[in-house]
Structures are given as structure tokens and as C-alpha cells.
Image: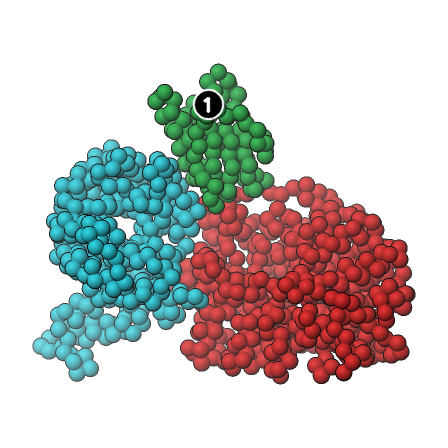
Chain colours: A cyan, B red, C green
Amino acid sequence: MEGTFGNSYFALANKGGFKMNSLYRTMFFVPGNDPHKIVKAEVYRPDCIVYDLEDAVSITEKDSARILVKHALEEIRPDIRVGVRINGIDTPFFEEDVRIITPLCPDFLRLPKTEKPEEVQLLDKLISEIEQKNNITVGTIKIVCTIETALGVYNAYKLATASSRVLAIGLGAEDFCTDMKTTRSADCEELRYARGKIVLDAHAAKVLALDFVYSDIKNTEGFLKNVLEAKQLGYTGKSVVHPDQISVVHECYGATAKDIEHAKAVLAAYDEATANGSGVIALNGKMIDAPMVTRAKDVLAYAKEAGVTYEG
Amino acid sequence: MKDELTFLQKYKEFNNKTWYEAQVEIPKQPLLQTRQTANTAGKVLASLSKAIDAVELRNGMTVSFHHALRNGDLVMQMVFAAIHEKGIKNLTLSASSLSLVQDVLFPYFEDGTITTVDTSGARGKLATWIQAGKLSKPAIFRTHGGRARAISTGELKIDVAFLAAPCCDTLGNVNGVDGKAACGSLGYAMVDAAYAKTVVAVTDNLVNKPLEYVSIPAKQVDYIVEVPSIGDPAGIATGSIRPSKSPVERLIAHYAAQVIANSSCFKTGISFQFGSGGIAISTAKAIRTEMEKRKIIASSAVGGMTGVLIEMLQDGLIDKVYDPQTFDTSIIHIMKENPNYHEISASDYANPFVPAPAVDLLDVAVLSATEMDVDFNVNVLTNSYGKLIGAPGGHPDAAAGAKLSIVTMPLLRGRLPMLLDRVNTIVTPGNTIDVLVTEYGIAINPLRQDLVDHYRRLAVPQYHVDELQAKAYKLVGKPQDNTFGNIIGGVVEYRDGRIIDVVRNVK
Amino acid sequence: MLEGEKQMEFSEKAVVAGTDKKGDVRLTLEVFPNQSENKIVIESKVLAKYGKQIESVINKMLEQYKLAGVYLHAIDQGAFDFTWKARLETAILRWQTKVVSK
């Protein structure tokens, strides 16, 4: 994407688009042991930064990364949503990660390889204890579950509803393939069912759905296709690992000026018809039904959250 | 110290006030007549040694060179080797700039062959020597336009101009587009040739047939010396002609492109300058895309030329190009082929005393910085430690001429913050800089309330310049100040001749 | 505080924290309980700008952990304060773990 970082921005006028939002269209993974990357992450304005203590950090540096992320949260926390991917429940690092990081009140902890609802409940309980000890309102810190096994996919809805802290569930493609005893391919056929089930279960549980990491950074066409697919399936956001990916996702999920204009027109017609007490609501000869009105409200709420200003 | 400075009648003691508050505009002075009557008999001489005899070079004279061959130049060292052999001393070296390769001249500084310097920039060993105050008087650092002004008004008198000539015919016509050491525009050399007392063309490509493409006419060339090689093509080519790879630089370029594309001057007829360097090139490419989308055709591109702009010329996106220095050797042939690709002198480019210098055409200029301060003053001459490493170049000229001057600069370079209370050296005054673009967002000069209003809804993070500085200091901490000594190594001249700052020795 | 000196007498007990990557600082630390003086050597390109700040951070950290007789060698690649504190804390905790486990 040489030279352009999002053409839709030329069409939209906004300053607030760079305030912190809760859209979670992008979760930008940053290696937890890399000070330079930690510092730089915020300039790319992802909706959310995830400091990674898990796969991005070697076993001998787990302590190092944990302490670095702790100090980063303490001293240079950006005005962007921030989460931490802790190590898995069955690792020797899990408890210390939770113990050290939770008091800093990140927006969420991301749990890898989540398989059973008891795991989520265990994490929930640990967080509650630490919140209480640190004068943080219990329930503030959320949980994001990464699902990376067949059992996890099977249990997706149960994981999403295991605790009121669950903010989102997402697919971890690489480890999932390993568990399924298959391999990754370009057309992602091996992920088709899991990808569909996770987004379905997420919406059924009313949590956010995060699509898997696309690691072929150089393949910009492939990435765009991948993001559009995810959006079409109903995914609310994507885990990203490179700055270039952020603007692509935001552009795909962005409301254009045209979308906003149309949404305003729909609501205006709806409001007018309601005020006049007329039975049928129409815009440009087409009937406006309840789902259309809901969609229009969603577009405007979404745009507002993203900081796009519009009159009215 | 006072003795060192008496010759600089316009010098004012620089204190910590914003410079432009105290100043009065200097009225335009008339320019001298350009040379018309060079020597005609026996122009071609057998050696540099004979040329030095012919021009009657004496101790204390001023010799000049252009820097269009950049780090590939071999002429300066050859000429000084010949001068040195004759034991001539106390010369003033007047160069349009001094590239790092000119460290090879260092022995001539040490032994007193060269005791005064008049240049745009200095690097390496020469810079260290100059900054330590080892010349007989402070060096003068001029802008490209300022040097042209000084030469064309007679303030800077050149006794002998040694002109590196990629192609020269036996009559004395010179161009920079032919030959193995082709460098493109001879914009700097044109000024020297027009006003120096004597001009010696040094060429490795002497041709019998009169040149079809002439940059400098024979009537301005007195002598010609042929040498095996005037320059190394690898050093003539600059590296900084490709778009940035780094995501941070590309982000800065994206924000800069946003500012330009959403400005009121972004319409057909726009005139711009982009310069070299990854960020400038990336910005130009983004602007190209936007121009194609909105069917905008630029009236001109001005300044040092690069491939990205010449491609736009060839593709009909820009009407005319005005080039005082060609950064990209791959486009040199187009200067010959395309009549809309104009080679212009540094004087026509940026001389503030010329009726209509090209920089005055500019709607937009995209510039870089080594540092900036909260009054929008820009430094391009010294680094964060106050060490001499660069040159004003055309920076202050373009900033003064352009309706919208944009500085692109990372807010942080490693741990070092680039937005300070006061820059080490003011080169371009803040009242000519309109927008600062960093990776964290932009800051608009409060002096431009019209721009603040215009960009209120721009889709780029915006800060007051103090907020941007505070953000940087929160991350890295406030840096300790540099300590300078009392020796003035050089004075920094603004384009119209006023002294804007000095360069003191670092402790 | 000494600058640029490379001769420090560490034993094989010394611990290391941090890396040589941009923005990081690599520390080698050893505590000699019989000594009261600290010996701290910092190699950094930004010493002229942040030397005092770095000193202050180090001293505060050593005070916080009540350490004396500390030999510390730091090779800095422009680390910010938060990184200095994190790497110091990591080195000290690794040292304490090592000492305890003996």
C-alpha cells in the first residue's frame, strides 16, 4: 500500500477519529519484549494495541517481557485501548503474568488456547481477586479468548458466555490447523467451518468476533480479500501484526460519506413518518423496514464512535 | 571576536529573541551585468597548472566551485593539488556546497592554502575544522538563493571559478547532460560563470563539434582544461531518490499528503517543490495518486529534481519543471529531450533580488529538518548536539516563496526529541513555516489562523505545537542543553543577506 | 560514573538483562556484598543529553532494592526511562533468584 494509507479519509472530515474508541476493528500485536515496537505502536492508531507476552517472547525472556510491559503500562500508556496477551493457563508463566499485569488495569487480558469455560472462569476469578486488592471496580478488566483447538471451536459459544468479562473471541489459525492435523493453505479452506462457527457463536453471545492473523505481510491483495471476507462473514475486527495492515482494515470497516448520507436520509424519513403518524415509511420509493432503521442507526453510531463528524 | 567580525557589516549580536521580530526588510539591490566577454584566444590549456598561471592566481584570492557532482566530484581536489604545488596560500574557498567527499581537501586547510570558506554547507573533517574556529575568519553559510544574490550583486567577488564541466566544446560552451560524469542541471555553476572575473572549465569530455544543448555559453568561459575524469558516476548519483520503506516515514508522508490534498491550492495550476529524501518522494507519490483521481494538472514543479516528478512531467501531470540541481541521474536525458524540462540557474531559482525567482511560484513546499522549535524555526545546518553536518541549501528560499510551507520531521529520532524550546541553529525563520508534520500528527503555526480554521476537520491528528512537544518530552524526558564555547566558527546568512544565527564551537 | 570504559571485572555469576536492539539497553549486573561502592559504566550515544536522567534512574532503582557493591555495565541504544527501569528490575530480580537458588 505504498503511498496511501486510506483513501476514504480524503472524503471524510474529522479530527476526533483519533480519540480512543471501543470499536476494536484492529487489534495490533506488539512483541512484549521489544521496547522500540512498544513505543512506536501508537502512531499507527490501531483501535487497540495488544502487548504480547506469549508467542512473540522466547522462554528465557518471559520475565523480561512481563516487567517491560508492566513499566510500559505504568509510564507510557497511550490513549488507545490496550490489552495484554498472557501465556496459556497450562504454562508456568500464566499466574505471574496475571499477578503482575492485572494491577495496571489493562482494558483486557487475551488468553491463548482457550478450550473450556472453566479456564475462562478461573481467569475471571484471579482477575477479581486482584481488582479487589487494587481498588479497581470488579469487572473492569475484560477477557478476550483466542480459540486455537478443535475443542475450543466446539465450545466457542460456551467460552463466550463463560463470564461477563468476555469482550471478544477470536480464531488462532496456525495452532488450530496443527490441532486439526492439517496445514494452512492460500484459500483457507481448512479454516472455513471454524471461521464461520466462531463469528456465529460470538454474535449469538453478543460479544465481538476477531478474525485470525494474516501473516503474509507482502501480499497486500490477499490481505484485502481476507479482510473483506471476514467483514462479509460478520467479523467485527481483525488481529493484525504489521502497521500497513491497520489502515486497510479501517478502510474496509469505515463508513464512507455516502453511507452516512444514506443513513441520515433513512432516519430522517423514519422520524418524519413517525411524527406524521403515517403507516408506511418510504425513501425514494423504497419501503423502509425495521432492520433498515436499525442498520442506519448502527452506521451513525459506528461513525460517531470512530470519530467521524457529520451534521445532525 | 570583534576583529573577526568587522568585515560582516550586517552582523547583529544574536540573542534569544525571535529573530524576525527585530528585523526590517532589506530593499532589493540591482544586479550586476553578467559576463559577455570571455577570453577568446587559446582557450584550451594543457594542464591545470598552466590554467593557474594563465588566470594569475595569487595569495588571498577567491576561487569557486559548484557541487552538482556531489560526492563524486574530483575537480576540487585536482585544482587544489595544482594550486598547492605553486605554494599559493590564504585562498577563500567559495563552493555552492561542500559534500563529504571534500574531506580530501583537509590537508589544504591544515597548511593554510585555504583560510576562508563561503559555502552553503559543510560536513566531516572540514566542518569540524570550521566549527572550531580554525579559519582566519568565520565561515559564511548561505542559502542557494543567498549565494546567488551575493554573487550577482558583487558582494561576493569570485576571482576564479573552476567549473566542472561534464561536456565542453572547444569554443567553451558547457553542458551537464552529456558525458560519463553527466550530472544534469548546472544551476549553481551558471551563477559563478555569469559573474566571476575568470572562468576555467575543467572537463573530461572535450568535443570538437559545437554543443547542441548549451547550459553555460562560451562567452562566459575563459579557459578549458581537459582531465581524465572530473567525477565518479557512483558518487554523483545520490541514494535519496527512492520512497521510504520505514512505516513511520510513510505515515509522515501520508499525513503531509493529506495536508496538501486538502489545501485550497490543490487544484489545476498548482506549483510545488518536494526535494529529495524518502519522505518527500513518498509524499510526491501520494500526491500524484490524488492528482490522477481528481484530474488535477500542476503548472510546475520547482527545485532539485527526482524521478518521481519527471515521470509526472512525462505523463502530463505537470506542465513545466524548473531544475537547479538534478538529484536523479536517470532523468538527465529528459532534460535534453523534453522542452518543458527547464534547467535554471540558482539565481533564477531562488535569488531574492531577481524580479521573479521560481520559488515565488510555489504554492506548496515540502521540506525536512534536523530540528525544529516551538516558534517553528527550522535547523538544517547542525544536529541535535550542535555539530555542523548539513546546509541551508534551498530550504529558506522555498519556505519564503511557498504559500504553504510544510516541514516533515519525525518527532523522535531514537531517544532524541526533535521539537525543542529553541533549535541549536536557526536557518529558516519560523514565520515562513506553516505546518509541521510528524508521525504523531501535525501542528499548524499559530501565525496562520487561516490554516488553523481551514484544517479544523482534517482527518489527521492535530496538536498545538506545545502539546506536541510535551508529548515527546513525556516519552523521552527533557534533554540537557548543549554547551558551546565563545568561538564563532561561522555565521548563518538568511537569503537576503541578514545574519540570522551563528555557529559556535561545541565543547 | 565512568563513560566508555570496557574493563569490568565480572565473574560468571553476573546476570544479563535487555538486548542490543534499537530502543533497548543491555545490562550486566553483579553484586559484591563485601563492597560498599558501586561501579557503574554506561555506554550510550545520548549521554550528553540524558546522562543525568539515566544516572538518576539507576540510583533510584538501586536505592529501592537497597543494593550496594553493585557492578553495572550498560550498553544503551537510546532506551527510554521505562525501559531502563524494566531492564534494571529484571537484572536485579534475576540476580536475587540466582543468589537464592545457590
Q: Amino acid at mark 1?
A: Val
Q: Which residue is mark 1?
A: C31
Is residue A56 left or right of C48 when viewed as pictured?
Answer: left
Q: Position of residue C71 (x, y in %)?
A: 50, 26
Q: Residue at x 58, y 54 (%)?
A: B370
Q: Residue at x 53, y 65 (%)?
A: B242
Q: Quadrant of residue A243?
A: bottom left
Vertical placement of residue A176 versus C54, above or below = below
Name the residue furthest left.
Answer: A279
Q: Position of residue B171 (x, y in %)?
A: 81, 80
Q: Position of residue A291 (x, y in %)?
A: 14, 69
Q: Residue at x 40, y 66 (%)?
A: A1
Q: Secondary structure at mark 1?
A: strand
Q: Residues within 10 Å of mark 1 (few under 14, many from 20)?
A: many
Q: Quadrant of residue B145?
A: bottom right
Which of the pair B348/B280 is nearer the observer? B280
Q: Position of residue B471 (x, y in %)?
A: 45, 49
